[in-house]
Image (cartoon, rainbow, N blue to C red):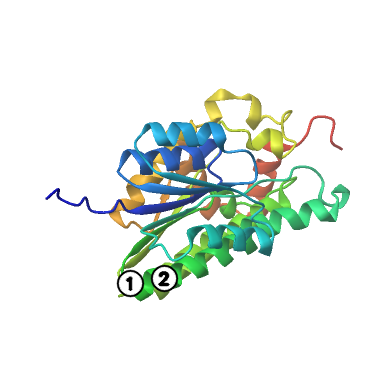
Amino acid sequence: MAELKAPRPLAVVTGASSGIGYHLALCAAEHGYDLVVAADTPLADAVLDFESMGAAVQAVQCDLATTVGVQHLVQAIGDREVDVLMSNAGHGLSGSFLAQEFSDVLHVINTNITGTVHLIQHVGRGMVARARGQILVTGSIAGFQPGSFHAVYNGTKAFIDSFALALRNELKGTEVTVSCLMPGATDTDFFERAGMETSKVANDPKLLMQPEDVARIGFAAMLKGEADVVAGWRNRLQVAVAKVLPAQATAQMHRKLVEPKGQV
């Protein structure tokens, strides 16, 4: 009689069509996980890459800024046990806050905060009930800095950084760990989607980390059950500086990096 293979563990990854999320999903596939991946952009090409690593993949294209989008992903997961949740979906918005369309502002808040905590609550409850699971939340070093011309985005990341560490503390003794990955500027389509193509940070390769490096750092930290990890020495230095300088000084530093050309 043929021996039955043990089922592969399941990882759920959001924002998995490109950038850091894509590489987090690749890391999971390399480590023997099957995948449920979600993004608000097409996933077909990414799915082929994940499947080439031996993973069984279910893709969900949905807008996680909406309750309907989160519910669509939850329905796709169904009653399967989630071993790893990598909540990475998020996007930015650049420019003067007063000039932004409020619908765009709200979409950033609902993607980065509302959809994230909604999904984590649903999946986290199942993990605690089974006394097993690992959650990786993609925060940002932006959460340590008042974000001039990035006011809403940095504010959402301040929330996420704080939320992840608070939840980790709440879950002590449950065998469920929460880790927060805090990258800095990374070479992804983030800048294009945020309208930041002309900013200094988007056009200086020395300031940008590669998404595969950020993902591997975060994935390793999650597997070890670490509380948080800042990806890259430049970013660790920025965080250290942000913790000692006055807030208005770090706001001015941030302005120099992201202020759109021609902005008054």
Q: What is the tally of numbered marks visible in this picture? A: 2
Q: Quadrant of the C terminus?
A: top right
Three-letter residue code for mark 1: Arg
Q: Is residue 146 visible?
A: no
User: In x, y percent, where is residue 38?
Assistant: 55, 48
Three-letter residue code for mark 2: Gly
Which residue is painted at 52% across and 43% down in the image? 238
Which residue is painted at 39% across and 60% down in the image? 82
User: 244 and 77: which one is in front?
Assistant: 77
User: In x, y percent, where is residue 53?
Assistant: 36, 34
Disc number placed over residue 130 in the picture, else none: 1
User: In x, y percent, where is residue 96?
Assistant: 82, 46
Alpha carbons under labels 2 and 1: distance apart: 6 Å
Q: Which residue is mark 2?
A: 126
User: 55 and 24: which one is in front?
Assistant: 55
CB of mark 2 within 8 Å of CB of mark 1? yes
Residue 101, placed above or below residue 192: below
Going by the image, does 232 lie left or right of 204?
left
Q: Is residue 122 visible?
A: yes
Going by the image, does 140 lie left or right of 130?
right
Determine the secondary structure under disc 2.
Answer: helix
Which residue is painted at 37% across and 46% down in the image? 219
Label 1 packing within 10 angstroms: few (<14), some (14-19), many (20+)? some
> Which of the 4 image quadrants contains residue 231?
top left
Label 2 packing within 10 angstroms: few (<14), some (14-19), many (20+)? some
